[in-house]
Image (cartoon, rainbow, N blue to C red):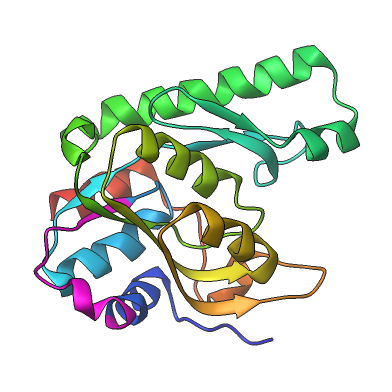
Amino acid sequence: MKPAFENRRAAGERLAALLARYKGSDATVLAIPAGGVPVAAAIAGALHLPIKVAPVSKVLLPWTTESGYGAVAFDGSVWIDQAALDGYGLKPEQVEKAIADARAKVERRRKRFQAWTALEDLGGKTIILVDDGIAAGSTMRTAIAALRKQGVNGIVVAVPTAHERSLEVLRKLADEVVCADIRGGGRFAVADAYEEWYDVSDDEVEAMLKR
């Protein structure tokens, strides 16, 4: 299947068209860094909405920098996919280290982007929660759970691309799910939806947010 988007910015512009009814509303665009920020920046710019950052990090498998079995959210809460964890046969100390690494990454980004991570005032607001794609969905579902505790008015998950299995789960957790490119099959990688794909650095994130 060929790529659906030229890059993350183009993907955000496509999503903004699908979210047009929120233009000029009281919604806040909330980006999951790092890859979700360029997508969210394009949405926020097109819809004239404020943008904030929700640091959430996957709890990674020890042999990869991409695949995980849970996540840590900006409020310190942890979600673990126990079924997935059981299948990997990891030792308790490996799990503890992975959670600690994820916590450290979340805290580092919370401090780095502190001008955009003050999320205490989101109660009663509609949140457009953005990432650059959803594979297993652990990052997004952990973010949703953390936002529910904040007492937000509604959560709209907005992603350029996602696997249909993960979207089915998220539709039960969010108030609305908007996805421009839904894919199926046994193999799924978010990067496959983009012609231009690279790891977004924290320096780039900060520059985008300042703009």
| Relative horizontal placement of residue 142, taking residue 80 as reference (left or right) | left
Residue 119 spot, x, y in % from top left: 23, 35
Magenta stretch: residue 23 in it?
yes
Residue 71 spot, x, y in % from top left: 57, 35
* Quadrant holding the C terminus: bottom left
User: How many dots with numbers?
Assistant: 0
Q: Which residue is drawn at 57% across and 22% down?
A: 101
Magenta residues span 17-30
Relative to 134, residue 69 above or below = above
Magenta stretch: residue 31 in it?
no
Relative to 141, residue 167 above or below = below
Relative to 102, residue 26 above or below = below
Image quadrant assignment for residue 131: bottom left
Residue 180 spot, x, y in % from top left: 47, 79
Q: Nearer the viewer, residue 54 or 3?
A: 54
Q: Nearer the viewer, residue 140 or 189?
A: 140
| Relative horizontal placement of residue 152, taking residue 66 as reference (left or right) | left
* Quadrant holding the N terminus: bottom right
| Relative horizontal placement of residue 33, taking residue 126 as reference (left or right) | right
Image quadrant assignment for residue 16: bottom left
Q: Which residue is drawn at 71% across and 37% down?
A: 81
